[in-house]
Image (spheres, rainbow, N blue to C red):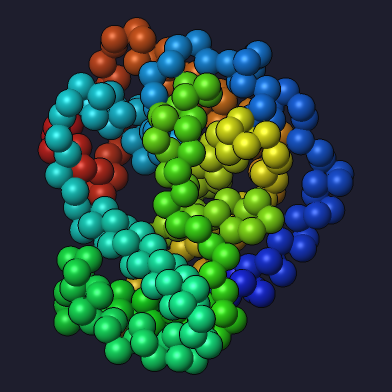
Amino acid sequence: MVGVVSRTALFRSLRRLHRLRLQDPVEEEVRGWSWDRPPLRPRAYLGLWVSEVAYRYCPTRRDVYLRRMGVRGEPGEAMVNGSQVHAVFAAACEDVRRELLLGRPGWEAYEAIAVRAVERLAGLGVNVESKPWLLDLYKRLILTWCAEEWAGLFVEYRVDGWCLGLSRNLRADGLAEGGVVVEVKYGRPHRFHRLALAGYAMALEAEMEVPFDYGVLIYVSESGGRARLSWEPVYISTSLRREFVEARDELIDMLLSGREPPRASSCPSSCPYRGECA
């Protein structure tokens, strides 16, 4: 789905997932609160990041091995842009929430935020002259959320994933009311992005003891100096959860073996460890 990331549009896009949930309910053994028994109980507790488990940019997982061995990668343009997109998204959420909690009406909140937009992004390390699309992204987000007077999206939401063999300091990109997990990505969609939603959902269930069935993947790209936004609603099904658990177990086995994974036959240009595999 393409357009503004408004509360109304996001939640309406979840409507078609209700039937999927009725037809294919999540099995109890892959609910996060079942962390103390198979298949969720991990073989080892290595404090894995959800991204290490879910993302398959490197098909052999050599990137995870090198990171765990202390090798420092060289972030490319795509990684820098992705980091700045996350920072802008978080800043927009925080700024709108602050102004609304001060009691300002939506239009007044927008004016108060927009007048400081360039300065705000400069504080995040964003040069709006070279990357005007990030300023466009920030202003579109604050305009949409101020118009709705929506402050119900919590960004960089911290969750302890240790009981699932994950990090104690996981941070979901966003958490919306109703238990909707939000992930923000820069660039084109990949199917494995859905696995990250499953990982965060199970970690949240383990910590809070309530179900998290839905997620939203928000994609940001740049075109002609403007930000392009789209999103995909995702039902966090039993099969998606099992796929994440299998990927976690495979990664644990690889790291415990101590064997260095082979170089990939085709290394993505965005990989920060590309120089290590040349």
Above or below, comparing residue 8 to residue 18 in the picture = below
Give coordinates of residue 96: x percent, y percent.
45, 75
Q: Is residue 173 left or right of residue 123?
A: right
Query: In which quadrant will I find the N terminus?
Result: bottom right
Residue, x 47% and y 71% (percent of image)? 97
Count of numbered badges drawn on the protein? 0
Which of these two is toward me, 226 or 115? 115
- Res. 263 visible in picture: no
Q: Is residue 16 left or right of residue 243?
A: right
Q: Is residue 23 left or right of residue 149?
A: right
Above or below, comparing residue 197 to residue 41 in the picture = below
Residue, x 15% and y 44% (percent of image)? 74
Q: Is residue 30 left or right of residue 273?
A: right
Residue, x 46% and y 63% (percent of image)? 219
Give coordinates of residue 145: x percent, y percent.
52, 78
Query: From this viewpoint, which residue is outermost toward the top?
Result: 257
Give coordinates of residue 225: x percent, y percent.
29, 82
Above or below, comparing residue 180 to residue 205 in the picture = below
Which of these two is toward me, 41 or 194? 41
Query: In which quadrant will I find the C terminus?
Result: top left
Residue, x 55% and y 54% (percent of image)? 175
Residue 83, quarter of the rendered image: bottom left
Residue 26, quarter of the rendered image: top right
- Res. 72 visible in picture: yes
Give coordinates of residue 114: x percent, y percent.
34, 86
